[in-house]
Amino acid sequence: MFPPRPAPLVPTAFAVALTLLLTGCSPSGTDGPGPEPAIGAVPALLETRSLAFPLAPYVPDARQLGILDEAQDVLVDQCMRRYGFRYQLRRKAPSADKPGDNRRYGLSDAAEAARLGYENPRMAGASKPPRQSLGPNEQLVLHGLEVDPSKPVPMNQEEAENSDAATTVVGGQKVPAGGCLRESTLKLYAPTADTVDGMVPHSFGFDGFTRSRKDSRVVKVIAAWSACMAEHGYTADNPMDPPRGIGDADLSGPQAIATAKQDVDCKERTNLVGTWYAVETAYQKQLIERNAETLDRAKKQLDERMRLAASLIAAGA
Protein backbone atom coordinates (compact mmCIF):
# COMPACT_ATOMS: atom_id res chain seq x y z
CA MET A 1 0.00 0.00 0.00
CA PHE A 2 2.90 2.35 0.75
CA PRO A 3 5.87 2.77 -1.60
CA PRO A 4 9.28 1.92 -0.16
CA ARG A 5 11.07 4.91 1.32
CA PRO A 6 13.83 5.59 3.86
CA ALA A 7 12.68 5.34 7.46
CA PRO A 8 12.16 8.77 9.05
CA LEU A 9 14.40 9.79 11.92
CA VAL A 10 11.35 10.36 14.12
CA PRO A 11 8.86 7.55 13.45
CA THR A 12 5.17 8.16 14.04
CA ALA A 13 3.16 5.79 16.19
CA PHE A 14 1.47 4.39 13.09
CA ALA A 15 4.79 3.95 11.28
CA VAL A 16 6.47 2.03 14.07
CA ALA A 17 3.50 -0.28 14.44
CA LEU A 18 3.58 -0.86 10.70
CA THR A 19 7.30 -1.65 10.91
CA LEU A 20 6.64 -4.26 13.56
CA LEU A 21 3.94 -5.79 11.41
CA LEU A 22 6.16 -5.96 8.34
CA THR A 23 8.91 -7.69 10.32
CA GLY A 24 6.56 -9.98 12.18
CA CYS A 25 3.37 -11.85 11.44
CA SER A 26 0.18 -10.79 9.72
CA PRO A 27 -3.07 -10.93 11.67
CA SER A 28 -5.16 -14.03 11.28
CA GLY A 29 -8.77 -14.80 11.94
CA THR A 30 -10.46 -13.07 9.02
CA ASP A 31 -12.62 -15.31 6.88
CA GLY A 32 -12.82 -15.35 3.13
CA PRO A 33 -15.60 -13.75 1.12
CA GLY A 34 -19.08 -14.73 2.25
CA PRO A 35 -22.63 -13.47 1.83
CA GLU A 36 -22.97 -9.71 1.77
CA PRO A 37 -24.10 -8.50 5.21
CA ALA A 38 -27.44 -6.78 5.76
CA ILE A 39 -27.16 -3.02 6.16
CA GLY A 40 -30.63 -1.91 7.19
CA ALA A 41 -31.74 1.67 6.48
CA VAL A 42 -29.17 3.71 4.57
CA PRO A 43 -28.57 7.18 6.04
CA ALA A 44 -28.35 10.25 3.81
CA LEU A 45 -24.79 11.52 4.29
CA LEU A 46 -22.25 13.66 2.50
CA GLU A 47 -19.34 14.83 4.67
CA THR A 48 -17.28 12.12 6.36
CA ARG A 49 -15.40 13.95 9.15
CA SER A 50 -17.75 12.85 11.92
CA LEU A 51 -18.47 9.29 10.79
CA ALA A 52 -18.20 6.78 13.64
CA PHE A 53 -17.09 3.24 12.83
CA PRO A 54 -17.44 0.09 14.96
CA LEU A 55 -13.67 -0.53 14.95
CA ALA A 56 -12.88 2.96 16.28
CA PRO A 57 -12.57 1.90 19.96
CA TYR A 58 -9.83 -0.55 19.04
CA VAL A 59 -7.70 1.92 17.06
CA PRO A 60 -5.94 4.96 18.57
CA ASP A 61 -7.34 8.23 17.28
CA ALA A 62 -5.28 11.25 16.26
CA ARG A 63 -5.07 12.59 19.81
CA GLN A 64 -3.99 9.22 21.19
CA LEU A 65 -1.41 8.79 18.43
CA GLY A 66 0.04 12.16 19.40
CA ILE A 67 0.34 11.01 23.02
CA LEU A 68 2.01 7.77 21.93
CA ASP A 69 4.47 9.70 19.73
CA GLU A 70 5.40 11.95 22.64
CA ALA A 71 5.76 9.00 25.01
CA GLN A 72 8.00 7.17 22.55
CA ASP A 73 10.32 10.18 22.41
CA VAL A 74 10.58 10.02 26.22
CA LEU A 75 11.53 6.33 26.00
CA VAL A 76 14.14 7.06 23.32
CA ASP A 77 15.68 9.74 25.53
CA GLN A 78 15.71 7.40 28.53
CA CYS A 79 17.56 4.82 26.45
CA MET A 80 20.06 7.34 25.05
CA ARG A 81 20.87 8.57 28.54
CA ARG A 82 22.24 5.13 29.44
CA TYR A 83 25.07 5.82 27.00
CA GLY A 84 25.66 9.43 28.01
CA PHE A 85 23.65 10.98 25.17
CA ARG A 86 20.38 12.87 24.97
CA TYR A 87 17.55 12.67 22.48
CA GLN A 88 16.61 16.30 22.00
CA LEU A 89 13.55 15.84 19.84
CA ARG A 90 10.24 15.83 21.68
CA ARG A 91 6.96 15.81 19.78
CA LYS A 92 3.99 17.25 21.65
CA ALA A 93 0.59 15.59 21.67
CA PRO A 94 -2.18 17.83 20.28
CA SER A 95 -4.13 19.70 22.95
CA ALA A 96 -7.43 18.93 21.20
CA ASP A 97 -8.85 16.34 18.86
CA LYS A 98 -7.85 16.75 15.25
CA PRO A 99 -10.57 16.77 12.58
CA GLY A 100 -11.61 13.39 11.24
CA ASP A 101 -11.09 11.88 7.81
CA ASN A 102 -12.68 14.24 5.27
CA ARG A 103 -11.79 12.12 2.22
CA ARG A 104 -12.66 8.58 3.23
CA TYR A 105 -14.76 8.05 0.11
CA GLY A 106 -13.15 10.77 -1.93
CA LEU A 107 -13.88 14.49 -1.88
CA SER A 108 -17.29 15.11 -0.32
CA ASP A 109 -17.07 18.52 1.38
CA ALA A 110 -18.95 21.09 -0.74
CA ALA A 111 -17.29 24.12 0.88
CA GLU A 112 -13.82 22.62 0.52
CA ALA A 113 -14.49 21.71 -3.11
CA ALA A 114 -15.58 25.29 -3.91
CA ARG A 115 -12.54 26.76 -2.17
CA LEU A 116 -9.74 24.29 -2.92
CA GLY A 117 -10.92 21.93 -5.64
CA TYR A 118 -9.13 18.62 -5.10
CA GLU A 119 -6.30 20.08 -3.03
CA ASN A 120 -6.26 18.36 0.35
CA PRO A 121 -5.43 20.91 3.07
CA ARG A 122 -4.36 18.17 5.47
CA MET A 123 -1.76 16.91 3.00
CA ALA A 124 -0.63 20.40 2.02
CA GLY A 125 -0.07 21.32 5.66
CA ALA A 126 2.00 18.25 6.48
CA SER A 127 5.42 19.16 7.81
CA LYS A 128 8.60 17.14 7.85
CA PRO A 129 9.80 16.02 11.29
CA PRO A 130 12.75 17.93 12.72
CA ARG A 131 16.17 16.35 12.64
CA GLN A 132 18.86 16.18 15.27
CA SER A 133 22.52 16.28 14.31
CA LEU A 134 24.16 13.14 15.70
CA GLY A 135 27.71 11.88 16.01
CA PRO A 136 28.72 8.36 14.90
CA ASN A 137 28.23 6.74 18.31
CA GLU A 138 24.95 8.56 18.84
CA GLN A 139 23.75 7.28 15.47
CA LEU A 140 24.78 3.76 16.44
CA VAL A 141 22.97 3.96 19.79
CA LEU A 142 19.87 5.45 18.23
CA HIS A 143 19.56 3.12 15.23
CA GLY A 144 21.66 0.09 16.19
CA LEU A 145 23.59 -2.03 13.73
CA GLU A 146 22.34 -2.55 10.21
CA VAL A 147 20.25 -5.70 10.40
CA ASP A 148 20.23 -8.50 7.88
CA PRO A 149 16.50 -8.70 7.00
CA SER A 150 16.80 -12.46 6.48
CA LYS A 151 17.78 -12.99 10.13
CA PRO A 152 15.34 -12.84 13.05
CA VAL A 153 15.34 -9.98 15.53
CA PRO A 154 13.45 -9.79 18.84
CA MET A 155 9.76 -9.04 18.33
CA ASN A 156 8.93 -8.06 21.92
CA GLN A 157 10.78 -6.45 24.81
CA GLU A 158 10.86 -9.62 26.92
CA GLU A 159 12.62 -11.39 24.07
CA ALA A 160 14.94 -8.45 23.41
CA GLU A 161 16.18 -8.41 27.01
CA ASN A 162 17.36 -12.01 26.63
CA SER A 163 18.75 -11.74 23.10
CA ASP A 164 22.14 -10.89 21.66
CA ALA A 165 20.88 -10.76 18.07
CA ALA A 166 22.19 -7.80 16.09
CA THR A 167 23.56 -6.09 19.19
CA THR A 168 26.77 -4.10 19.58
CA VAL A 169 28.60 -2.31 22.41
CA VAL A 170 29.07 1.43 22.99
CA GLY A 171 30.79 2.76 26.11
CA GLY A 172 30.92 -0.72 27.60
CA GLN A 173 27.17 -1.22 27.35
CA LYS A 174 25.25 -3.43 24.95
CA VAL A 175 23.18 -1.55 22.38
CA PRO A 176 19.94 -3.41 21.64
CA ALA A 177 19.02 -4.63 18.17
CA GLY A 178 17.61 -1.67 16.29
CA GLY A 179 19.03 0.75 18.84
CA CYS A 180 17.00 2.99 21.10
CA LEU A 181 14.37 3.56 18.43
CA ARG A 182 13.47 -0.11 18.33
CA GLU A 183 13.74 -0.52 22.08
CA SER A 184 11.27 2.34 22.58
CA THR A 185 8.95 0.74 20.05
CA LEU A 186 9.02 -2.64 21.77
CA LYS A 187 8.55 -1.18 25.25
CA LEU A 188 5.51 0.78 24.12
CA TYR A 189 3.94 -1.50 21.50
CA ALA A 190 5.21 -5.02 22.21
CA PRO A 191 6.31 -5.40 25.83
CA THR A 192 5.44 -9.11 26.08
CA ALA A 193 5.08 -12.09 23.79
CA ASP A 194 1.28 -12.08 24.12
CA THR A 195 0.93 -8.50 22.88
CA VAL A 196 -1.55 -8.15 20.04
CA ASP A 197 0.22 -6.40 17.17
CA GLY A 198 -1.01 -2.81 17.11
CA MET A 199 -1.62 -3.13 13.39
CA VAL A 200 -4.17 -5.93 13.78
CA PRO A 201 -7.18 -3.62 14.35
CA HIS A 202 -5.91 -1.40 11.52
CA SER A 203 -5.70 -4.46 9.29
CA PHE A 204 -9.28 -5.42 10.09
CA GLY A 205 -10.24 -1.88 9.11
CA PHE A 206 -8.37 -2.19 5.82
CA ASP A 207 -10.08 -5.53 5.25
CA GLY A 208 -13.53 -4.08 5.94
CA PHE A 209 -12.91 -1.20 3.56
CA THR A 210 -11.63 -3.53 0.82
CA ARG A 211 -14.65 -5.80 1.17
CA SER A 212 -17.03 -2.84 1.12
CA ARG A 213 -15.43 -1.52 -2.08
CA LYS A 214 -16.27 -4.81 -3.82
CA ASP A 215 -19.78 -5.08 -2.36
CA SER A 216 -22.54 -5.04 -5.00
CA ARG A 217 -24.32 -2.13 -3.32
CA VAL A 218 -21.19 0.02 -3.34
CA VAL A 219 -20.37 -1.00 -6.91
CA LYS A 220 -23.90 0.05 -7.90
CA VAL A 221 -23.75 3.45 -6.19
CA ILE A 222 -20.30 4.17 -7.66
CA ALA A 223 -21.72 3.38 -11.10
CA ALA A 224 -24.58 5.80 -10.42
CA TRP A 225 -22.12 8.50 -9.34
CA SER A 226 -20.00 7.86 -12.46
CA ALA A 227 -23.11 8.17 -14.67
CA CYS A 228 -24.00 11.45 -12.97
CA MET A 229 -20.51 12.79 -13.68
CA ALA A 230 -20.78 11.62 -17.31
CA GLU A 231 -24.06 13.52 -17.70
CA HIS A 232 -22.11 16.70 -16.97
CA GLY A 233 -19.24 15.89 -19.31
CA TYR A 234 -16.78 14.33 -16.86
CA THR A 235 -15.11 10.93 -17.20
CA ALA A 236 -14.79 9.46 -13.72
CA ASP A 237 -14.91 5.90 -12.44
CA ASN A 238 -13.15 6.13 -9.07
CA PRO A 239 -14.71 8.46 -6.46
CA MET A 240 -11.46 8.44 -4.49
CA ASP A 241 -9.50 10.22 -7.24
CA PRO A 242 -9.95 13.37 -9.32
CA PRO A 243 -11.59 12.63 -12.71
CA ARG A 244 -9.54 12.46 -15.88
CA GLY A 245 -8.10 15.77 -16.96
CA ILE A 246 -7.24 16.97 -13.46
CA GLY A 247 -3.50 16.63 -12.94
CA ASP A 248 -1.56 16.68 -9.69
CA ALA A 249 -0.01 20.01 -10.67
CA ASP A 250 -3.36 21.79 -10.84
CA LEU A 251 -5.63 20.39 -8.13
CA SER A 252 -7.03 23.77 -7.14
CA GLY A 253 -7.29 25.68 -10.43
CA PRO A 254 -10.59 26.87 -11.94
CA GLN A 255 -11.16 23.64 -13.87
CA ALA A 256 -10.40 21.54 -10.81
CA ILE A 257 -12.78 23.58 -8.66
CA ALA A 258 -15.61 23.31 -11.20
CA THR A 259 -15.07 19.56 -11.46
CA ALA A 260 -14.82 19.12 -7.71
CA LYS A 261 -18.09 20.95 -7.12
CA GLN A 262 -19.84 18.65 -9.60
CA ASP A 263 -18.15 15.63 -8.03
CA VAL A 264 -19.56 16.48 -4.61
CA ASP A 265 -22.97 17.26 -6.10
CA CYS A 266 -23.09 13.83 -7.75
CA LYS A 267 -22.04 12.15 -4.52
CA GLU A 268 -24.90 13.92 -2.76
CA ARG A 269 -27.45 13.06 -5.48
CA THR A 270 -26.55 9.36 -5.42
CA ASN A 271 -25.95 9.23 -1.64
CA LEU A 272 -22.63 7.54 -2.29
CA VAL A 273 -21.27 8.37 1.17
CA GLY A 274 -24.35 7.13 3.03
CA THR A 275 -24.45 3.86 1.11
CA TRP A 276 -20.73 3.16 1.37
CA TYR A 277 -20.69 4.03 5.07
CA ALA A 278 -23.61 1.67 5.78
CA VAL A 279 -21.92 -1.15 3.90
CA GLU A 280 -18.48 -0.63 5.44
CA THR A 281 -20.02 -0.44 8.90
CA ALA A 282 -21.73 -3.80 8.32
CA TYR A 283 -18.43 -5.42 7.31
CA GLN A 284 -16.66 -3.97 10.35
CA LYS A 285 -19.35 -5.37 12.65
CA GLN A 286 -18.93 -8.73 10.98
CA LEU A 287 -15.16 -8.65 11.50
CA ILE A 288 -15.59 -7.67 15.16
CA GLU A 289 -17.94 -10.60 15.76
CA ARG A 290 -15.51 -13.03 14.13
CA ASN A 291 -12.45 -11.69 15.96
CA ALA A 292 -13.96 -10.62 19.28
CA GLU A 293 -11.36 -12.31 21.51
CA THR A 294 -8.38 -10.82 19.66
CA LEU A 295 -9.94 -7.36 19.55
CA ASP A 296 -10.90 -7.46 23.23
CA ARG A 297 -7.25 -8.19 24.07
CA ALA A 298 -6.13 -5.43 21.72
CA LYS A 299 -8.48 -2.94 23.41
CA LYS A 300 -7.26 -3.83 26.90
CA GLN A 301 -3.65 -3.51 25.76
CA LEU A 302 -4.37 -0.18 24.06
CA ASP A 303 -5.81 1.12 27.35
CA GLU A 304 -2.69 -0.10 29.18
CA ARG A 305 -0.49 1.50 26.52
CA MET A 306 -2.25 4.84 26.91
CA ARG A 307 -1.83 4.72 30.70
CA LEU A 308 1.88 3.94 30.28
CA ALA A 309 2.24 6.78 27.78
CA ALA A 310 0.58 9.26 30.14
CA SER A 311 2.90 8.25 32.99
CA LEU A 312 5.98 8.55 30.79
CA ILE A 313 4.99 12.02 29.63
CA ALA A 314 4.28 13.12 33.20
CA ALA A 315 7.63 11.79 34.40
CA GLY A 316 9.51 13.31 31.48
CA ALA A 317 7.89 16.73 31.67
Image (cartoon, rainbow, N blue to C red):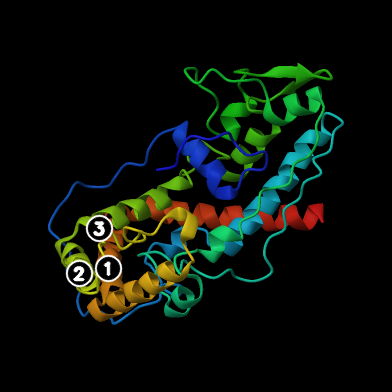
Left/right placement of residue 153 relative to residue 138 reads left
Q: Quick one: SS at disc 2?
A: helix
Residue type at mark 2 is: Val
> Looking at the image, do the residues carrying marks 3 and 1 touch, with CB atoms under 8 Å apart?
no
Residue 260 vs residue 13, the one in the foreground: 260
Q: Which residue is mark 3?
A: 213
Q: CA distance from mark 3 to mark 1?
A: 8 Å
Q: CA distance from mark 1 to mark 2?
A: 8 Å
The quarter of the displayed image where residue 218 is located: bottom left
Residue 167 vs residue 295, the one in the foreground: 167
Residue for point 84% across, 38% down: 86
N-term mark: 3 or 2: 3
The disc at residue 276 is: 1
Residue type at mark 1 is: Trp
Residue 196 vs residue 149, the one in the foreground: 149
Residue 279 horizontal/vertical position (percent): 24, 67
Residue for point 54% across, 70% down: 99
Asked if residue 265 can be seen in this view, the reply is yes
Residue type at mark 3 is: Arg
Q: Which residue is mark 2?
A: 221
> Vertical placement of 207 versus 46: above or below?
above
N-term mark: 1 or 2: 2
The quadrant of the image that shows the C terminus is bottom right
